[in-house]
Amino acid sequence: MNLVLLGAPGVGKGTQAKLIMKKYSIPQISTGDILREAVRVHTPLGLKAQEYMNKGLLVPDEVVIGIIEDRLKSQDCEKGFILDGFPRTIPQAESLANAMRRLNMSLDHVINFELDEDILIKRLSGRRICEGCGTMYNVYFNPSSEDTVCNLCGKNLFQRKDDHLETIQERLKVYRAQTMPLIDYYKTKNKLVTMHLDGTEGPDLIFDQFCNLVES
Ligand code: AMP
């Protein structure tokens, strides 16, 4: 199963991708995670990406497109994959289509998650991540009982640089201008399935709905 997860930052694509990965044994390919790791270890890619990421802007298409084509060639993508955070622009979607054609692959579904912007802002601004085990918390919806340290491993929680309010507003602006056009793009290709969320459903319930959609 070859999937694209679409939706604004904070909608929960990453959480759903992890559940899909576990159930269907296909890898999650998150360009955000790949770029953050490149920044962390100071590769040339990371150095190029960092200034855009810190400002909440998209990394230039030619930089991210190269990452994806290489990744799709890996053996673990043979049974399928979940693209999380890619494509984010029409040129990225077109180069994905070209790369998949070259690799003899096709997309099965593009899942578009929708959620009100005020909830997205709380999800992003409240997000805290454990520096030890990576567990995610949210100061509004799912706080750690230990406040600034992880319930599970006791390590410190940190906030992503791009989860500060000003950068969040920029990321949402970028999403509306550059990524939302993909909704129509995939609609006209008959690939799009939209899931309207209201913010009260837990990840497991959303995942059940997702499974019903793709298995029906
Ligand atoms: P994410 O974790 O998906 O919210 O991505 C964090 C940041 O990484 C974004 O704000 C962008 O700066 C960068 N990024 C991730 N995916 C892409 C992409 N497909 N195209 C351009 N920039 C990206």
Image: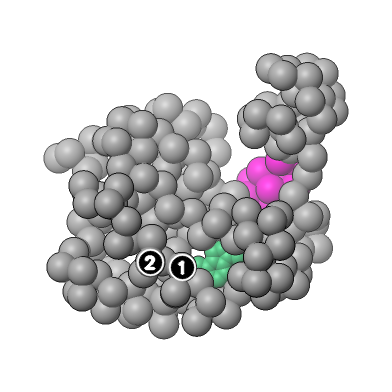
Neighbor class of circle 1 (other Cα within 10 Å; few <14, some 14-19, many 20+) is some
Q: Most prominent secondary structure in the magenta stretch? A: helix
**Considering only vertical position in the picture, is 180 above or below 75?**
below
The one nearer the camera, 127 or 156, is 156
Query: Looking at the image, in which quadrant does ligand 1 appear?
Result: bottom right
On whether residue 144 falls in the magenta region, the answer is no
**Range of the magenta residues?**
118-127
The one nearer the camera, 86 or 200, is 86
SS for dot 2: helix
Write the residue at 67% across / 75% down: 48
Q: Quadrant of residue 110?
A: bottom left
Write the residue at 32% across / 56% down: 74
- Image spot of residue 117 (x, y percent): 62, 55
- Image spot of residue 215 (x, y percent): 17, 39
The one nearer the camera, 122 or 64, is 64
The Cα atoms of the two marked residues, 2 and 1, are separated by 6 Å
- Image spot of residue 118 (x, y percent): 67, 51
Mark 1 lies on residue = 67
Task: Give left or right: position of 48 versus 112.
Answer: right
Mark 2 lies on residue = 70
Identify residue type, mark 1.
Ile
Residue 54 in sight from this viewpoint: yes
Disc 2 + disc 1, Cβ < 8 Å: yes
